[in-house]
Amino acid sequence: MLDRSNTGRTLKLPKNFKVNTIKFQIINSRDTQKNVEVRFLNFQKMSLRYALRDYQQSLVRQVFEQWAMGRVRRVLLQLPTGAGKTVVFSSIAQQFTHRNQPVLVLAHREELLLQAREKLEHVTGEAVGLIKAGYPENRSCSIQVASVASLVNRQLPPAALVIVDEAHHSTAATYTALLEQFPHACILGVTATPSRIDGQGFKQLYDCLILGPSVRELIDRGYLSPFKLFAAPKTVDTTGVKKTAGDYNPKQLAKAVNASLVMGDLVRAWQEFAPGKKTVVFAVNVEHSQAIAEAYCESGVPAEHLDGNTKDLDRKAALERFARGETLVLSNCGLFAEGFDLPSIEAVQCVRPTSSIVLWLQIVGRSLRTHPGKEHAIILDHTENWIVHGTPDRPHHWSLDPISLSPGRWNVVCSHCRHVFKPLSHERKPQRYEWRPQEGEFVVICHYTCPNCGEVLEFEERDGGDPIPPRTLENDGSAEIWEIPLDCRVEILAELYRLVGFQRRVRRNITLQWLANQMVRKCPDIGAPELRECALLLGMDRDWAWDWACQTIEQLSARGKSSPRANGYR
């Protein structure tokens, strides 16, 4: 029996585990160890408090079949918005807790956390702990739902299963750092849209992808609502709007929306196609959303605005009014694309152009849940999203593989496989600074990992001018990060690093004498500190390197081949 009363433990499963029986080790805060035997990979029939639909049961079985094969640990599960992803992963979590094994659920927003906790408690019949700033913790619960932002600064709970909600976000550094702390746990990512607009895929994060039924199939079977899509004749003109991180720049997009549409256009479209319908509006920014809500109110339609800065109590009260029908139109900015499940929503009004298929499907998916009395959902599109991304039931070929982007100014082309992608934000942090004597400045060197082939690339970050093509980062020594010694002349060091780096990239063995001769020829005023670095780069002892450098300078001075610049530090 697994004791869950101790909160100071980490859980470790050995790599060479068997399929049916796993022995793992629990290390508690006193560093005492005990072996525990558990059985969990094979799906077991058990009495459920919540009846699963047939396709949900099939997905649960497929997940366990992948784990049972022993070659797959990280599974990504795709299921359209409204098809019951939370129910599915709650049922999988119940399989673990039924065997007294701890479960951790990761999410990035409060709505997702609270929704997951509520559904987990309903499905499993167990209390669920919540790890998030502002909420009391209960680490004795076998299931913990945790905010990614909060968990990175707190003690990790034990987990035999880690579930990542809205897993299309899991390429972020905070997610990957957390998942790396559970190297032997089963990983289950769930998302409606396994796709990214930055050329990043999921093949480096997950071992396999399991696809659920399509939106069209779910509509035909009555599990999702039929819809009517109305494309407004007057749409947002995005001509000239630049893109940031793969999607339209918010500031420029707001100007384009204001220039293309007046608020009366939105109200008139709603009055014509969705009068009296409970509607969620998706706006470009906060000011835009506030103006939309105000325009509806001025026309006599009860409307409210919400955004991420709305106080929790005010937001909860507004949602309750919307659920009761007291508010008919709820305008928002960046709030309801994920984690907002209200089946009684009858219409969505999109005034937010996007290049992201993920965002578009999340927006339209808000209206597709079935509800008594709802014959069909209404989608009012004041953009050309439906032209770019298609209707909600358009088939998609989801894959773990990344989708290569079109070549662009700051898109990176992998020198190994030619895949085009945008680097992740955490990859833009400098790995080192390299002196460029021709340009009279240091350049920032970053390391990017190609999401397609896994090759590590070096890239120069520049504020202006044309970007420099990336180069492969070798693993044989030229990939070292060299600290710049302050007693050396940086222009001579730059030449030294360039010379040594090239020789290592072409895998050419060099001797200290050859390197010293090349550097003396290229830099006649080389001094002992730079010669010391020559020896250090070839693995010599620091004291020996300094003595050799001083002797070499004396010999060069005696022969008149170098200025006697021997002063420096060891």
Image (cartoon, rainbow, N blue to C red):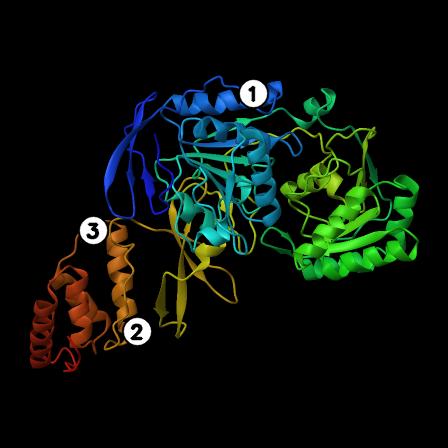
Please give the name of the residue rendered at 14% of the width and 62% of the height, measured from the top-left corner.
Answer: 514
Q: Amino acid at mark 1?
A: Gln
Question: Which mark's residue is nearer the viewer, 1 or 2?
Answer: 1
Res 312 visible: yes
Q: In this picture, is 308 found above or below 5?
A: below
User: Which comes before the other along the chain, label 1 or label 2?
Assistant: 1
Image location of residue 97, percent across then percent down: 45, 30
Direction from residue 529 to residue 15 in the image, left or right: right
Image location of residue 199, percent across then percent down: 53, 44
**Disc 3 secondary structure class:** loop
Q: Residues within 10 Å of mark 3 (few under 14, many from 20)?
A: few
Q: In this picture, is 214 found above or below 257?
A: above
Which residue carries the number 3 mark?
Answer: 508
Q: Residues within 10 Å of mark 1 (few under 14, many from 20)?
A: some
**Disc 1 secondary structure class:** helix
Say which of 101 and 86 sits in front: 101
Which residue carries the number 2 mark?
Answer: 491
Q: Amino acid at mark 2?
A: Glu
- Disc number placed over residue 113 in the picture, else none: none
Image location of residue 538, percent across then percent down: 16, 59
Please give the name of the residue rendered at 55% of the width and 19% of the height, measured from the top-left corner.
Answer: 58
Question: Which mark's residue is nearer the viewer, 1 or 3?
Answer: 1
**Disc 2 secondary structure class:** helix
Which residue carries the number 1 mark?
Answer: 57
